[in-house]
Image (cartoon, grey):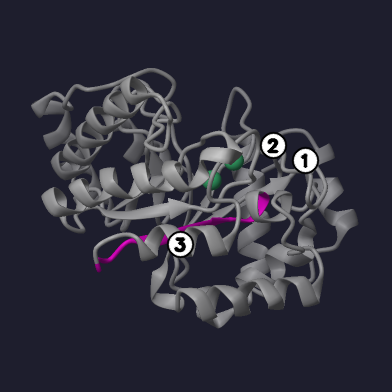
Amino acid sequence: MLRLGVHVSIAGGVAQAVERALHLGCTTFQVFTAASRRWAFDAVPQESAELFRLERARSGITPVIAHAPYLLNLASPDERVRQMSIRALDAEFRRCQQLGIELLVLHPGSCPPQERTTGIAHLCTALARMLAEYGSSPRLCLELTAGQGNALGSSLEELETMLGCLPDGDVGVCVDTCHALAAGYRLDLPEGYERFWEEFQRRFGWERLGVLHLNDSRYPAGSRRDRHEHIGLGYCGLECFRRILQEPRLRSIPMILETPKGEDEREDRINLSVLRRLARGEMLSEQELQQLWSQDGTL
Ligand SMILES: [Zn+2]
Ligand SMILES: [Zn+2]
């Protein structure tokens, strides 16, 4: 079965996320376990965590993925920021354990180009601590980034370096299609797509692929800009997603949409239906895609 879902809001309590995912027909979903744009060190209120576990068990949805807050920077040259980040990541692991969340996606962080080696060393020291404490529950997945600003982790090679510095554990990789394209991997071209997965397989093996973020890219290949676009409407293009959804080796990997959202579920519904149609092998054309988006509230 295809594990396909979206990043859902936890507004109104984390258990609400399950309801939202079910409503969209998701078979997996992703959440922030706390506010994503400020420091969060608190646990989930016990009642709220229990309710989440209950609702999630009832839904049958598995796995559930958490995305670590954006502020965390374990590679920062600033000692204070690193300490805060370690505390915040520790809290994130705890919240995931409270909630029974299986996978935790983390951006490797950022630091000035001349300090990359030190930055990666700081990151690995911090992660080794977490792995010693929490093992693989949740399983940590480092995300391939677009390389915007001084972001680390915008190449498979650099992610391999990071994984190589960690104690032999079960750390995975999260591949985001928008980030990969923006970082210069030509997922929009058949050869580029093949080359990317060949390299992935050579460096990591399939068992390291923990999560796929399916996002199109608002900016062209190599732009190093991290701006997500609706499926098929950006520079990755419909064919890129068709290849992914028709790829037997990727079938068992949880796939999460982080595409732009409006006031209601309309955008998520359209993007999900496009992906489901591609998965069923339907010959959805660019023109039909445009039509889906131009018709108002039809889905
Ligand atoms: Zn992502
Ligand atoms: Zn992104």
**Marks 1 and 2: in contact by CB < 8 Å?**
yes
Specify which label sits upstream in the sequence, 2 or 1: 1
285, 164: nearer the viewer: 164
Task: Give the SS element for disc 1.
Answer: loop
Helix, strand or loop at disc 3?
helix
Q: Which amino acid does label 3 sit on?
A: Thr
Residue behind mark 3: 161
Q: Mark 2 points at which residue?
A: 227
Q: Which residue is found at the position 85% from the left and 55% from the top?
A: 288
The residue at the point 79 percent across, 75 percent down is 190
Q: Dot 2, how many residues are within 10 Å of its Cα: few (below 14), some (14-19), or many (20+)?
A: some
Identify which residue is drawn at 44% across, 41% down: 119
Determine if the C-beta at disc 2 is less than 8 A from ligand 2: yes
Q: Do labels 2 and 3 touch, CB within 8 Å?
A: no
The N terminus sits in image quarter: bottom left
Dot 3 beta carbon under 8 Å from ligand 1: no
Asked if one can make out residue 211 in the rendered structure from this viewpoint, the answer is no
